[in-house]
Image (cartoon, rainbow, N blue to C red):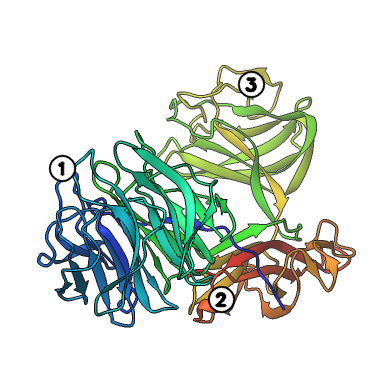
Amino acid sequence: MVTFPVLAQVWIPVGPGADRAYAAATLDTARGVAVRVGGIDGLLQAIGTTIEWNGNQWQIVSLSGPSNRRYSAMAYDPVAGHSVLFGGVGAPSDTWTWDGTSWTQVATTGPTARLGHGMVYDSVRQRILLFGGQDLAPLGSAIALGDTWEWRGGGWTQVASGGPARGEHAMCYDAVRDRVVVFGGYLPFPTNARLGDTWEWNGATWQQVATSGPAARNGAAMAFHAGRTRSVLFGGSGGALPFGDLWEWDGASWSEPFTPGPVPGSRDGHAMVYDPARDRVLVSSSNSQVSLDTWEYGLEPSFESFGSGCDSSRTALVTCQESNPTASGLTGQVIPSELAVVVGSFSQVTELAAFEIYTASSTGNPAVVAARIYPLVGQTPVASTTLAVGATPGWYRATFASPTAMPGRFFVAVDLSAQNVFVPESTLGARSSTFVRPSAGGAWVPSQIQRVPWRLLCPEALVPAIGRSGQPRLGTTYQVQVESAPVSTLAALTSGFSHRSWGGNPLPVPLPNAPGCELQVAAEITHFVMTDAAGAAAVPVGVPNSATFLGFELFHQWLVLDSVNVLGAIVSAAAKVVVGP
């Protein structure tokens, strides 16, 4: 049996927000849309419109229905097929349902009028649970409420009265453990206390289960992430400033998960719902005084390389030394001489295959001049070739028949005696030591030409590079690619479920008679292909369209035949794939 660890989740910005805080919010699972109604806008005015998230933006879907209200609560009833809204500031003790098209008032009795209460759907008992809040009495006489109610479709029933009184708390239903989870909240004036404890409802009683974890706060939001089997809490108000931290409750303790990449800004009074179809938590804005954006928290498909490959028999030219790589103009000189630039390093040998200079022909037509390598002492070139120069200022390359090993410092030179090519001197840049001499030969003498743009090109062994096209998402196919491999030869894509062990042996494992080459993934599946004339190949990998595979990890590595070593094979780096929605 293959088991997988709980994977790191990421925050993904998915679109703009909506200008409303402390609005009621829920997810209509039948239609796959998040619903928000009411709230406070950036001018601190109550709102009555209904909006829905279509996957890209929030859209107004109803201008009528419940009165303008804030600090209300809502939950979706999948059996009845509608969302149920209750209470809030600016509202009596009324209950409304939303079917995706219109609002219907279904009750005016039940819990007392209140604000900052919580509502969730209990999937085991198939009813909506309402807990807590604060009554609507004036400031100074308001009290926190600790009663618990159930909505069973025909009316409200009180099921407990002695719960942990509070308002503006975060609340969700853990469908795996069959528990309603409550965190934090607020006790009104004159107490003015923010709470930092955690309580759970087991269907009959409330029990305090933690007094440590996130800092005390109100106005936070929480949703149960079924894919991670954790209750996820984000944001809230600690007083002067809102929070921007993320916490997860596993039923025993709170933890702050690592979330690489960007994160949402701090906020309170925001919306937070779990979308089971995408296995992600949706977090949206509060109002324009705080934030106006929408994020998702969950798995994102990824393809990340790790480890390293080993050298092939193929080589490519790379810059091994340069000066003035961003050349700026030419001085426009011509000289009747051969120009040499001092290059190289005192402490190493340079295996020179080519060099480039920045210049242009002076006649407006292409020109060809001699290019040479000289030792610092001596007038006989070690290697010679030609340099073709065009009329447009740019980098032009002189390539030698084979690489030349040059110890220490040496000259690279171009013959400018025909005066049909401009002196390769930039108007700005670093200085180099240069020498000139007549084209017919003779002694080298120091030159006043200094700001020469040049680069040396040395051969470097290519390493097969692993890559991909497409994303490893449910119901799609991505391609695992290899590039820079030997051409027209057999390549094998090895895939497995681990990068730590294979067949009881630890990974990585060195390949015999192949220096620097290591097998880094369990070779449980192998696909054979031929590389093309460019040394590239690809293998398609299909991902089943099943939520079972969300977070599934797969590891890939290429092995390519090559006579560069005794084994006759080389490898690429490896890659880790995580399947996302």
Q: Which mark is in front, 3 or 2?
A: 2
What's the amino acid at mark 2? Phe
Amino acid at dot 1: Leu
User: Which residue is outermost to the left?
Assistant: 64
Tags 2 and 1 touching, CB below 8 Å: no
Give the left or right position of residue 33, taking residue 573 as reference.
Answer: left
Badge 2 crowding class, 10 Å Cα cut-off, few under 14, some 14 to 19, many 20 or more, is: some
491 sits left or right of 224 in the view: right
The reply to whether discs 3 and 1 touch (Cβ–Cβ < 8 Å) is: no
In primary-sequence order, the first of circles 3 and 1 is: 1
Looking at the picture, how far across and down is residue 134, in whole percent? 28, 51
Q: Which comes sooner in the sequence, label 2 or label 1? A: 1
Q: Is residue 243 visible?
A: no
Q: Residues within 10 Å of mark 1 (few under 14, many from 20)?
A: few
The residue pinned by badge 2 equals 549
Circle 3 crowding by C-alpha within 10 Å: few under 14, some 14–19, many from 20: some
What residue is rendered at 29% in x and 42% in y? 290
How far is mark 2 from mark 1, CA to CA? Answer: 45 Å
The amino acid type found where label 3 is placed reads Ser
Residue carrying label 3: 433
Q: Secondary structure at mark 2?
A: helix
Percent coordinates x, y for residue 463 in the rendering: 70, 58
In whole angstroms, how far apart are the C-alphas of marks 3 and 1?
Answer: 69 Å
Looking at the image, is mark 2 or mark 1 nearer the viewer?
1
Give left or right: position of 382 versus 467: right
Q: Is residue 45 above or below residue 86?
A: above
Mark positioned earlier in the residue sequence (3 or 2): 3
For residue 43, which numbered disc appears in the image?
1
Quarter containing the N terminus = bottom right
